[in-house]
Image: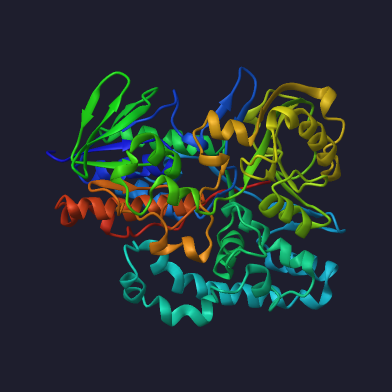
Amino acid sequence: MNSSVIVIGAGPGGLASAILLASAGVRVKLLERMPIVGGRTSAIQTDSFKFDLGPTFFLYPRVLDEIFAAAGTNLREEVKLVRLNPQYRIIFGAGSELNATSDLVQMEEQIGAIAPEDRPGFRRFLEENRVKLKRMMPCLEHPFLGWQDLLKTRLLKMVPMLRPHQSLDTYLSRFFRDPRIRLAFSFQSKYLGMSPFRCPSLFSILSFLEYEYGVFHPIGGCATVTAAMAKVAERLGVEICLDQPVEEILFEGRRAVGVRTRHEIHRAQALVVNADFARAMSRLVPDRLRRRWTERKVARKKFSCSTFMMYLGIEGTFDLPHHNIHIAEDYSRNLDEIENQHTLSADPSFYVQNASVTDPTLAPPGMSTLYILAPVTHQHPNVDWAQERDRFRALMLKQIAKAGFTDVEQRVRYERVITPADWDRQYEIYKGATFNLTHSLDQMLHLRPQNRFEDLDGVYLVGGGTHPGSGLPVIFESARISTRLLLADLGLAKSSGTFLTPQLAPLKFEPVQ
């Protein structure tokens, strides 16, 4: 084990990278600035309640299972997953609601009840996107280190099907005429921090994945997944150092040779950076060493929206679905206020996770947890969260009553609020943009910060700020791409099991009763 790598950040991408590198025989040291692993996929835990800090949807588990297989284990042994049915409930401010389900007959009936003419479009949507995903897989599984890689993956031949210059909403109009039904298959663009009216149509695969492969809840929350990843990494010999913020990357010329923390210097042959991309560059790398991603150029890039968060421990329970999405009556206006006006909406869309209906481990008997999220503008001078925090909190408590969560405030036994300002200052997220760089056409593939970082030698990126982008399955894929490049550069490609796709038994998960 002569090769050594330092991983900065114990988020899902950093943990996945550590597992893959250690599985290939590399000596790995993982440095995390927080006292717990997981990054934004960690937990907020009290004596009575447990919440996921960030992601709550767990999709397409096969990618993580393949990563675990490289470590000699499997996802079923490490994490208990429950498949949700309904997957989520969508409440339309313009009228009606829909319980999304992977039972295709039931889903067709629900679509038909809202918009009879749209019922046949559901199967056509699934059929086309099944082919679309298969053809897109090379784009999601391979690095894009220059425009030449567009030709290697034959991406240009797929343009007619991918329709990259078409918005997601426009693409869906081929299948669904009713705007509410289109929203049911396009709100997932918020996983990328984008509007469905601007998000490229190729991301229709996000909603397809939900219906084709299911939506899951890890018992204990998504933070249980990253905790399990840390255990697997440590079994492989990864040294995880918590409460160790990296203060500087050390260079010899343009090559990274180590890092400095507040306590000591660590040296290695290569670095994997899993921190927020823009903030990490600003904090850790002198501007003079960067060419393509200087401070000035980063500031001109487009960043996603942010989120206003409430985590409530509640006396009592709610007989409502696990996931609840409420879409504002004037959704176009709501999105314009977030993305263009950078103001706070009077009628914001929101999401409520009522996880205790599925998972009794999150709260004491007779009590429950509510996780409330409202997409809002990233940090902008138009919004002073020191002034707006309490007002917007009160507004959200009124809003969630529209989804059936009534009589909440007097039953609160625990509360925490996180604003975009908190994401920025406490969690080191540039502009508080929780979904990182937007996924517009001019910020995708080789135009995104590259997996083998083009500005520095010996630095590899993982996470939502690099290719392929945001979302847990995609972040796991970024770890596979970046570690393949790193291992090849270390001359370890032939001995690495990460280059093989394991032959896995079909994944089986416990359904919700």
| Total number of numbered discs in the rendering | 0
At 67% across and 73% down in the image, what residue appears? 170
- 342, 242: nearer the viewer: 342
At 35% across and 48% down in the image, what residue appears? 461
Can residue 488 be seen here? The reply is yes
- Image position of 361 with respect to 403: above or below: above
At 63% across and 29% down in the image, what residue appears? 362
Say how the picture is coloured.
rainbow
The quadrant in which the N terminus is found is top left
Can residue 72 be seen here? The reply is no
In percent of width and height, residue 477 lies at 40, 54
Residue at the limit of the structure toward the left, as seen here? 2
- 46, 284: nearer the viewer: 284
Q: Quadrant of residue 467?
A: bottom left
In percent of width and height, residue 56 lies at 60, 42
In percent of width and height, residue 300 lies at 50, 52
Q: Quadrant of residue 98?
A: bottom right
In the image: residue 243, left or right of residue 307: left
- 327, 317: nearer the viewer: 327
At 58% across and 24% down in the image, what residue appears? 45
In percent of width and height, residue 271 lies at 27, 41
- Image position of 340 with respect to 14: above or below: below
Q: Quadrant of residue 197?
A: bottom right
- Image position of 366 with respect to 395: above or below: above
